[in-house]
Image: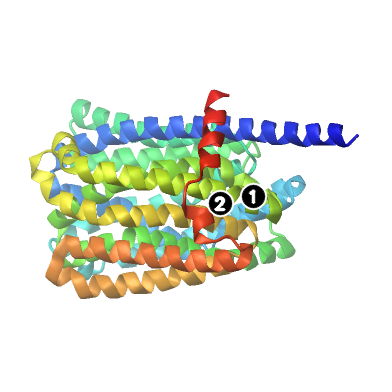
């Protein structure tokens, strides 16, 4: 009898490993294809726009993300968490989520018009960003619905659909830009902006369709209270995560101007290619962390972290060695000033990948507030360092500020995670022989 039970357990573990390997392989394949498409798009945009307009375009696309993150009240993670815990009442959760998103969108659109009207936002030619104020404003609800719905698809374990949306997110802007620029003869900046906005609209609509629930609108006091309660605790996590990634764009734009932002945008675009690996892992792991027991998480988390961190360090070294060649080939000689900030950002990207996985573990344990506090400290430090360094060191100073902030966030999350799980730094960071055997076994399958 004991032998049969052991065989059942081994069979279950083997089945879970195979399923995860298949989902991770699918997600990784999707992300690699996304990288290829984004590299082509970024290369074309860099050469068509030039550094100044490329910087302005980065600001146009980043502002809606920052505004959305600042005012979404953590609803994305809240709706995902409650769906994972009570999938039978999904339509009730979705209906109440949609109602909240519509109300939030109205306030955020108004806030965006106010922000874009501020002259300090752009160091030079402040009227240039104001010409795109309507695109920025109405991109916010599109982003909001897309992000929330993709999170819901993820927690419902519809990995193929999530990957399809991710792939279209890279493909649609590229195709749309080429059509608008080459066939309809729009200026490069307007073509890029229209392509980005129209793609957002299509993706938001597609995410609604894929949920197969229509567009329900409900108002339940208890459900709204539950969503806002979890969301409020995790809201600042979402906000601070986005600020850590994009507030540096605001500093470069305000202090140094569009051309410097063009260089810095290319540096971050190249550095963030490394996030393909952790992003591929979080797709299949999101549902796991939201639904599984703490014991299951404690068994899986250290293995994934060890493999992830080893891979990220190796990739960062490769990028540091070949980064200048990559920039020269893809973006052209005009963007070579992006190489130094790229090398300064690479260690930070490694730390950020650690944060992305540990953060999921905390969210699955109903501890979004912990992540918010640590992320908030990192953001305050980031702002302080940016103010201190940007005037004297330019975009290199901004890159250093980001890397130090990511490092502090990673250390803070590790300390709390260790106290909670008992997992040491060696157990979560140093690759072991058993990890290599496990990976070899999964690949063979």
Q: State the residue in front, 225 or 185.
A: 225
Q: Position of residue 93 (x, y in %)?
A: 68, 52
Residue under the image location 33 percent in, 59 percent down: 246
Q: Which mark is residue 228?
A: none
Q: Which residue carries the number 2 mark?
A: 302
Would residue 430 appear left or right of 33 to someone viewing this image?
Answer: right
Which image quarter is the C terminus in? top right
Above or below residue 146? Residue 256 is below
Residue 176, position in %: x, y? 31, 31
Left or right for 350, reference 442: left
Write down the quadrant of residue 155 in the picture.
top right
Residue 96, above or below 21: below
Mark 2: few, some, or many residues within 10 Å (few <14, many ≥20)? Answer: many
* 413 and 171: which is toward the camera: 413
Work out whether residue 107 can be spotted.
no
**Residue at the image position 31 percent from the left and 55 percent from the top:** 347
Is residue 267 depicted above or below 36 in this figure?
A: below
**Rendered residue at 47%/53% (across/down):** 429
Q: Is residue 427 visible?
A: yes
Residue at image point 51% right, 45% down? 432
For the residue pair 62 and 192, the one nearer the viewer reads as 62
Q: Give the residue number, with chain letter if any, for mark 1.
A: 299
């Amino acid at each position: 009898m004991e032998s049969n039970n052991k065989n059942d357990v081994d069979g279950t573990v083997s089945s879970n490993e195979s399923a995860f390997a298949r989902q991770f392989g699918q997600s990784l394949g999707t992300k690699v294809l996304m990288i290829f498409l984004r590299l082509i798009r970024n290369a074309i945009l860099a050469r068509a726009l030039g550094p100044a307009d490329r910087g302005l375009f980065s600001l146009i696309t980043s502002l809606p993300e920052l505004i959305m993150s600042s005012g979404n009240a953590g609803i994305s993670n809240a709706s995902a968490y409650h769906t994972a815990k009570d999938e039978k009442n999904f339509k009730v959760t979705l209906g109440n989520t949609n109602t909240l998103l519509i109300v939030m969108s109205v306030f955020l659109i108004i806030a965006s018009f106010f922000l874009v009207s501020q002259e300090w936002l752009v160091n030079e030619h402040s009227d240039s960003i104001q010409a795109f104020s309507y695109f920025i404003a109405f991109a916010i609800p599109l982003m909001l619905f897309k992000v929330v719905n993709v999170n819901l698809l993820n927690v419902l374990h519809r990995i193929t659909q999530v990957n399809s949306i991710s792939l279209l997110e890279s493909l649609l802007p590229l195709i749309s830009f080429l059509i608008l620029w080459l066939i309809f003869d729009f200026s490069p900046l307007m073509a890029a902006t229209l392509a980005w906005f129209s793609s957002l609209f299509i993706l938001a609509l597609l995410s609604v369709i894929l949920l197969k629930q229509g567009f329900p609108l409900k108002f339940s006091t208890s459900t709204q209270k539950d969503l806002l309660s979890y969301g409020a605790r995790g809201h600042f996590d979402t906000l601070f995560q986005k600020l850590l990634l994009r507030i540096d764009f605001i500093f470069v734009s305000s202090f140094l101007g569009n051309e410097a932002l063009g260089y810095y945008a290319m540096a971050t675009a190249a550095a963030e290619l490394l996030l393909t690996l952790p992003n591929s892992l979080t797709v299949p792991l999101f549902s796991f962390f939201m639904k599984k027991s703490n014991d299951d998480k404690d068994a899986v988390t250290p293995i994934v972290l060890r493999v992830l961190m080893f891979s990220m360090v190796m990739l960062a070294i490769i990028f540091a060695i070949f980064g200048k060649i990559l920039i020269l080939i893809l973006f052209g000689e005009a963007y070579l000033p992006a190489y130094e900030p790229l090398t300064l950002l690479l260690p930070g990207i490694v730390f950020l990948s650690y944060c992305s996985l540990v953060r999921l573990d905390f969210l699955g344990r109903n501890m979004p507030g912990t992540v918010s506090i640590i992320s908030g400290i990192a953001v305050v430090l980031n702002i302080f360092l940016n103010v201190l360094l940007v005037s004297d060191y330019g975009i290199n100073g901004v890159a250093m500020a980001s890397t130090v902030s990511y490092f502090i966030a990673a250390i803070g999350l590790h300390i709390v995670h260790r106290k909670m799980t008992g997992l040491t730094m060696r157990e979560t960071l140093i690759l072991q022989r058993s990890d290599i055997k496990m990976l070899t076994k999964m690949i063979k399958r």
